[in-house]
Image (cartoon, rainbow, N blue to C red):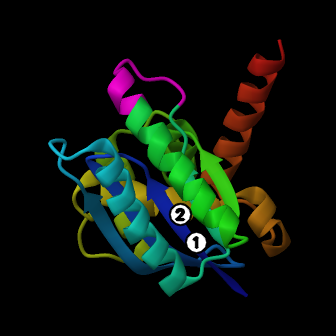
Amino acid sequence: MSRRIVGIDPGLTRCGVAVVEVSANRTAKFIAVDTIRTSPNQDLAKRINEISIQIEALLDEHKPEIVAIERVFAQQNLRTVMGTAQISGVVMLLAERRGIAIQMHTPTEVKAAVTGSGRAAKLQVGNMVAKILGLTEIPKPADSADALAIAITAGWRPSVVASAGELTKAQVAWQSAEAASKKKRSH
């Protein structure tokens, strides 16, 4: 059994969107990828609406079981955080209205899932995304590659693939990072 997953790298200027299918044996198949762009010169409400319309069409066309969104929890640039949060909220609303499960993943979780290291560079993540999906080159711009990585992470999440058997090294590293993060938050 495979699951269709939409990955979202939220942003107002560039919003990466991707669709993958992940089978029970953790094989990931590329379905689609794009980066939705809006102009910073446009009115904020128009930009949010434009992204919303395109994501809505993507969800209706591909009918995923899971929508995975990158969660940005720390960022120096307040405008970037606000735009990311606004688009994340829109995506969550659209998924919730369709009864689609929602997962949030930090950049560290995504890096650990696809590379085995939560500190991997963007190029490493892009290379691994291309390798995992059997692509001849890294999807560009980086927002597209990131959206694919987020979707793969959701498909490889231990609770999603627990029935498939052993975890990969990347999944073990991710579980360890997740457990350490939970310990820090509880203290």
The amino acid on which the numbered mark 2 sits, given as a three-letter code, is: Ala
Q: Amino acid at mark 1?
A: Ile
Q: Residue at coordinates 63% horizontally, 48% vertically from top-left?
A: 104
Q: Residue at x 46, y 33 (%)?
A: 119
**Image-based side of 155 in relation to 115, left or right:** right
Q: Is residue 20 left or right of residue 143?
A: right
What secondary structure is marked by label 2? helix
Residue in the picture at 83% in, 11% down: 187
Q: Is residue 116 visible?
A: no
Few, some or many residues within 10 Å of mark 2 (<14, 14–19, 20+): many
Q: Is residue 163 above or below residue 168?
A: below
Which residue matches tag 1? Answer: 5
The image's mark for residue 151 is: 2
Judge by depth and name the residue closer to the eye, 105 or 42: 42
| In the image, residue 124 above or below residue 185 | below
CB-based contact (under 8 Å), mark 2 and mark 1: yes
Indicate the position of residue 80 as horizontal and vertical percent values: 35, 31
User: Is residue 108 in sight in this rendering?
Assistant: yes
Q: Is residue 129 left or right of residue 27?
A: left
Residue 32 in the image: above or below residue 101 = below
Tag count: 2
Q: Quadrant of residue 27?
A: bottom right
The numbered mark at residue 132 is none
Tell me the residue at 67%/75% (across/down): 65
| Image quadrant occupied by the N terminus | bottom right
Q: Which residues are magenta?
A: 73-81
